Amino acid sequence: MGISFVHLQKLNISFNILSGSIPEEMSNLSSLRSTLDMSHNLFNGSIPPSLGSLPETVYIDLSYNNLSGPIPLNGALINIGPTAFVGNRLLCGLPLKISCSSSSQSSNSQNSGSSSGMNGKHNNSSRGIFVITVAAGVIAGIFIAGFLFSNWYKKVCTCKIREHFAGCKFEQKLKVGNDLFCFKRHGMDTVPENLEHYYFVQVDLQVNLDLDKLLKSSAFLLGNSGIGIVYRVVLEDGRTVAVRRLGDGGSQRFKVFQNQIEAIGKMRHPNIVNLLAYCWSVDEKLLIYDYIPNGDLATAIHGKPGMVSFTPLSWPARLKIMNGLAKGLAYIHEFSPRRYVHGNLRPRNILLGQNMEPRISDFGLGRLANLTEESLSSSSFQLEQIMAETPPQNSPYVQRTSSSLAAPGPCYKAPEASKVTKPSQKWDVYSFGVVILEMISAKMPFMRIGSLEMDLIQQFQLCIEERKPLCDLLDPFLAPDVDMKEEIVAVLKIALACVHKSPEKRPSMRFVCDNLARLA
């Protein structure tokens, strides 16, 4: 490999289900300059120390494999952040914060046991391999037959709405429970000629969701926006989910909806809100997500009118959120060769989990909203099960208004977004930069002072041009953190690079992610 590709400058073999150990010959790719991406495969064994001999400018990504053992700390491997190694549960050592002492003891005991067994069975290895091969073939045949039967059965499973409910709206249909729905564990059929059908598809099979129980559970209105109405639903087992109602959509749009929702459903990352299931019909579309309990980043930064108490985030907490946000956005960008773009990143779409870890929401919803045929702004949702209560103060879905804000959406959009129709990942980088500046300063993204209008970037540029002290740019709450000054300046430089007017000069989210990981 090293001899054949000596002039190779970039190698991306991610998402190819490659297995076995990482070839030592990878270290011979001395002409690499940008990326060696071997992530999302099935590579096992240890990381060859020889990879450290690659040029130090190369970013090596080994995440989401089955690698094990200590991470070599030499050469090009020294300056790589922890995101390059995540998803390998048997790896240990820096930059992962996992000690190698316990894992090495476990590994040694397993290796000693397996080596002794191997000596005893060496003479019968050929016969054993033959038996295993035959057995594997039989099992594979049974599995394929079962899979084909399962698919056929799913297509047969359709539930026709009873005629006396055919003309009613979703609010009324919910009351009749499972008479109106067909529950399927996985997969999606094409639209039948009779459009009076509903399909409930569970995306996350590790979570047990029963549609009948879901519809009978207590639900609370959380908010209403341009991308639908959101409810908090408490299930019988105590689990809480968020249900977003997207509204009407014609049958001719089903395929587009299906393709878009499948892309959303495949996203699985600790810093992205997980889609658990969805329901589709001609008149209604529902998305069921994990419920994230601690509100959104906008509330954590600025508070909300009417809040009894408000404690600003500490600098370590802000840095943790920035780091997780960068990881989630980098994952979206690198997940598929189609180069996905979030397109609507802002503090209100960044939810905060139990331990204040950030979770990116609303990925892909902009396009889904365009599939609806009627606006939801005037929709009413009257259910006996839904209590007309005021949304909780920490609700991440409540619309906020402020006299100092004007059209918050454009504040986070890159300047070129209004001129170019094809979305770019650099748009997300720009939005990320604005969010970081907002977290550092605790200032609104757009200010109107008398007749003067100024966005957050202009405020920072003005302070820098006038050579004002750093404390003039910071949230006053951070002023006492003098020992964090170097970190804050480093983050500020990253944010300013992200909001560069020229998209080509903005860094990639991978670059941003690794630099923030070093700080964290």
Image: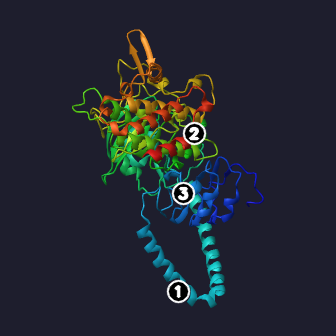
Q: Counting residues from the N terminus, which is met first, the one under dot 3 or under dot 1?
A: 3
Task: Please give the residue where the numbered disc 3 appears in the rendered image.
Answer: 64
Q: Quadrant of residue 505?
A: top right
Residue 168 appears anywhere in the view:
no
Task: Please give the residue where the numbered disc 1 appears in the rendered image.
Answer: 116
Could you say where residue 58 lies in the image, as x and y percent from the top left?
A: 62, 49
Q: Residues within 10 Å of mark 3 (few under 14, many from 20)?
A: many
The amino acid at mark 2 is Ser
Task: Please give the residue where the numbered disc 2 appears in the rendered image.
Answer: 508
Q: Is residue 16 above or below residue 517?
A: below
Left or right of residue 352, residue 118 in this image = right
Could you say where residue 197 lies in the image, as x and y percent from the top left?
A: 51, 44
The amino acid at mark 1 is Ser
Query: Does the CB distance between marks 3 and 1 fall below 8 Å?
Result: no
Q: How is the image coloured?
A: rainbow
Q: Counting residues from the N terminus, which is met first, the one under dot 2 or under dot 3?
A: 3
Task: Tell me which residue sits at (47%, 55%) in the image.
Answer: 95
The amino acid at mark 3 is Tyr
